[in-house]
Amino acid sequence: MPLTDPTTTLSEALRQRLACPRCDSPLSAELACPGCQTTYPVHDGVPWLVADPAVTRQEWKNRWQMALKDLEARQQAARDALKRADTEASEARLSVLADGYAAQHRCLKLLLTDLGLAAGADLETYLALKTRLPTRMGLMAYEANVFRDWVWGEKENAASLEAVAATLKGVQTGAMLLLGAGAGRLAYDLHRHRTGTPATAEALTVALELNPYLSTISRRLASGDSVELVEFPLAPDTGTHAAIPRRLSAPEAAVPGFEVVLADVMRPPFQPASFDVVITPWLVDVIDGDTAALLALANRLLSPGGHWIFHGSLAFQRPDPLDNLNLDELESLAGRSGFEVVTASESVQSYLDCPESRHGRRESVITLSAKKTVEAEAPPRAQNLPDWIAQGRMPVPLLPAFQSQAMATRVHAFIMSLIDGRRTLEDMAAVMEAQKLMPKEDAETAIRGFLIKMYEEAGSARGL
């Protein structure tokens, strides 16, 4: 549930840096923006500093319900397969898998119930209303990273810490921001590494992440709590490892100054020049936003002489080939974004190499440090939702696009009403013609195209 007094959980060092993600105005101690008349909530100890918190909350509620339904479907599929198993090995593996899905369902509900994401409607209603989050940003999209961060990834975590820490020698690191912090292990390790000396005992480390599953885990583990989850290795080495109960915990509770914020990396809710270091770990090549805009945002958030640290892969897969940068192009872009590249190193490291899985890979990991030398031009502000959507207190305008969509929706609903398990496409087209909606020949082609789209969406919905 939201906390009524955010000041009880957020440090003064963080609060004095916060800004409204809608208009950039400084926020009050209660996380209220006087300009937008918006008060931002705190859920389970994490402030939700997104431009449209109610909308974002509803979207994540959608994704959470879909994740639970997916686990239920996977459990049922494993149970059905178990009935057909013809060897003891298959029976053992499928039994472990089915029990694992059931246990994970319980773990997720326990972990995220405090966020108030329980369903208020059935899944079909949420699906019909769609979602604005990127489709690849499923609640569990980075599940393997969670276990790497907090269970078996000591070697990988140590390699990342060593690479990033090496770029920070001799650098002022009082206030540090990690954009796209994931499950938070690198942020935690850096905070722990920096606060081990009296000179940095008051360091501020902010882990910014948009996924509430990841931010909740990060916040709870860093505070000293443990979390129980089930891991499903991609290629388990034995049947008993098809589903592995795990207890996640940090080596120790983080000292004060470690903060977790739920926000969009392309709309960071901070005042200009708030940080000495901005780190983008495994982020630049996977975000939907423009790389130049991200670097401009990093520049804006840094104090004069501050450092931007890039750490991760350059495995771009964007539709426009121009956007798939290599290291030389990234360094050139950094120079045009107000940075001077200080160091750039590359090493081959293990990645998601779960010890109970036959699957793992090696990545060529780049760590680049660049010093802010000039103020970059501010990127265009991301457009806010209009107040009649975000606030819900103004009449919804009858836009031409809405009128057009209303007509299309009525036609689609009529087509769906014709599906009764007996009619063929030809029969349905005949009804369309009888209703004087369109000629039968055109109607059959249109219905076929509509049903192809519906059929394909039904098949892909499980991955959202």
Image (spheres, rainbow, N blue to C red):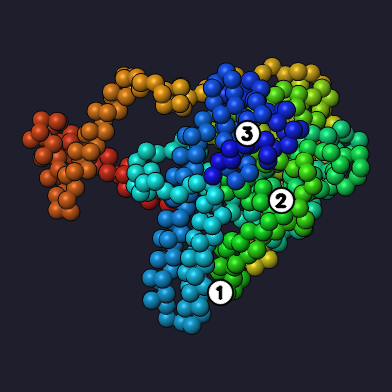
Q: Amino acid at mark 2?
A: Ser
Image quarter where the N terminus lies is: top right
Residue at the spot 59% in from the left edge and 40% down from the top edge: 3
SS at badge 1: helix
Q: Is residue 233 above or below residue 464?
A: below
The answer to which quarter of the image holds residue 262 is top right
Q: CA distance from mark 3 to mark 1?
A: 40 Å
Please name whichever residue, 132 or 282, is drawn nearer the observer in this view of the structure. Answer: 132
Real-space Cα separation, disc 1 to disc 2, in angstroms: 35 Å
Disc nearest the viewer among 1 and 2: 2
At x 24%, y 42%, the residue is 448
Q: Secondary structure at mark 3?
A: loop
Is the residue under label 2 in contact with that under label 3 (CB below 8 Å)? no
Q: Residues within 10 Å of mark 1 (few under 14, many from 20)?
A: some
Q: Nearer the viewer, residue 427 or 214?
A: 214
Residue 297: image location, x then y, percent:
68, 26
Residue type at mark 1: give it. Answer: Gly
Query: For numbered disc 2, what is the local secondary structure?
Result: loop
Q: Earlier in the sequence, mark 3 or mark 2?
A: 2
Name the residue beneath numbered marker 1.
Answer: 239
Give residue 265's mark: 3
